[in-house]
Image: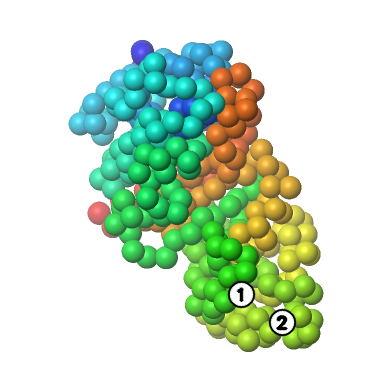
Amino acid sequence: MKATQPVNSGNNNKPRIAIVPGDPSGIGPELIAKLLQDEEVLTAANIVLVGDEHLWRRGAKQAQTDIKINSITADELSTQFGLCHLPLNTINEEDVKIAEVTVTSGTTSLRCLDKALDLAQSAAVDGVLFAPFNKSAMTSAGLNAEDEHRYMARYLGFKGYHSEINVLDSMMTTRVTSHIGLKHVAENITEDGIILAVELAESTLKRAGKNHPSIAVAALNPHAGDNGKFGREEIDIITPAIEQCQNRQMNVTGPWPSDTVFLKAKRGEVDAVVTMYHDQGQIAIKLLGFERGVTVAGGLPIPVATPAHGTAFDIAGQNKANVSATRQAFDLLVKMATTYRNERLACS
């Protein structure tokens, strides 16, 4: 592959973003090919594509476009700006099976992600964008974690609090509980858990450029418990947690009934909603804008983002993939990576 622009056409003042193709059996390579056709994307950051060359060629072919980039070694990365490619050898071209869950696709997903995380840990890049992964394929290839977010934390050796964050346009959600059965939600809601979810929302919003974000905390029970009639979690746990946050000068309100709190978010009255369980936030976000949703690996020491939708095997290889969520993920990641880069440089 050859460069679409001179090798050093970018500049060192912009963040450098590593982009991973996602599961090669899905729409990931096509999405990235479409993303790179936008001149605003190419001028917003220095970009390094991490992965097998034939995957990027395949994505360009699927998108009926062309990607011509400069292939480099890891040692050359610090001197290269604009768009470049760090080639890997993780999967044979003939082993890519479109719209199929395979161990080989899961393996390439993990190895490309590993390399991007290595680059981020060494400060060679300022953020990581990955196209959609297939959890079944990754699990068969040795994911050995609840999801890719837990995998990344373990790979980075990060022991602090972290959780998946969902973003739609200017709206953000964090969770007190996540991938657990609904019958276990109430017993896992604690004051500390709520405070951590609020802190995660605030710190992520600040990294994305919001100086004093407004955060609403959702109730657990119908009508926010109706003064204890439908449950005491709001009285005994959620309200005390909110008061602790307010005492720390955080702009937090609630608990708000979950059937109305997202109306406040939709109207722009709050920047984030802290939900008590997975679907409480996910249903609202996906109904409001499934094709624009973004997932952020909140709490990790490096910025990581991805489109919130999946690998879409039903349309893989057909040039039908909508790039909107990937573009939203890229734009948000650039903001976060810029803040992260500036903070890192200030401490160096």
319 up-or-down from 170: above or below? above
Question: Residue 61, image x and y in percent?
Answer: 51, 13
- CB under 8 Å between discs 2 and 1: yes
Residue at the (31%, 52%) spot, across then down: 156
Q: Amino acid at mark 2?
A: Gly
Label 2 crowd bin: few (<14), some (14–19), many (20+), radius 10 Å: some
Which colour scheme appears in the figure? rainbow
Q: Secondary structure at mark 2?
A: loop
84 up-or-down from 332: above or below? above
Foreground: 322 or 25? 25
Residue at the (24%, 31%) spot, across then down: 74
What residue sits right under mark 1 in the picture?
A: 186
**Residue 220 visible (yes or no):** yes
Question: Residue 123, image x and y in percent?
Answer: 28, 45
What residue sits right under mark 2 in the picture?
A: 231
Q: Secondary structure at mark 1?
A: helix
Q: Earlier in the sequence, mark 2 or mark 1?
A: 1
* In this picture, residue 208 sits left or right of residue 171: left
Question: Residue 193, image x and y in percent?
Answer: 51, 73
Question: Residue 304, image x and y in percent?
Answer: 44, 47
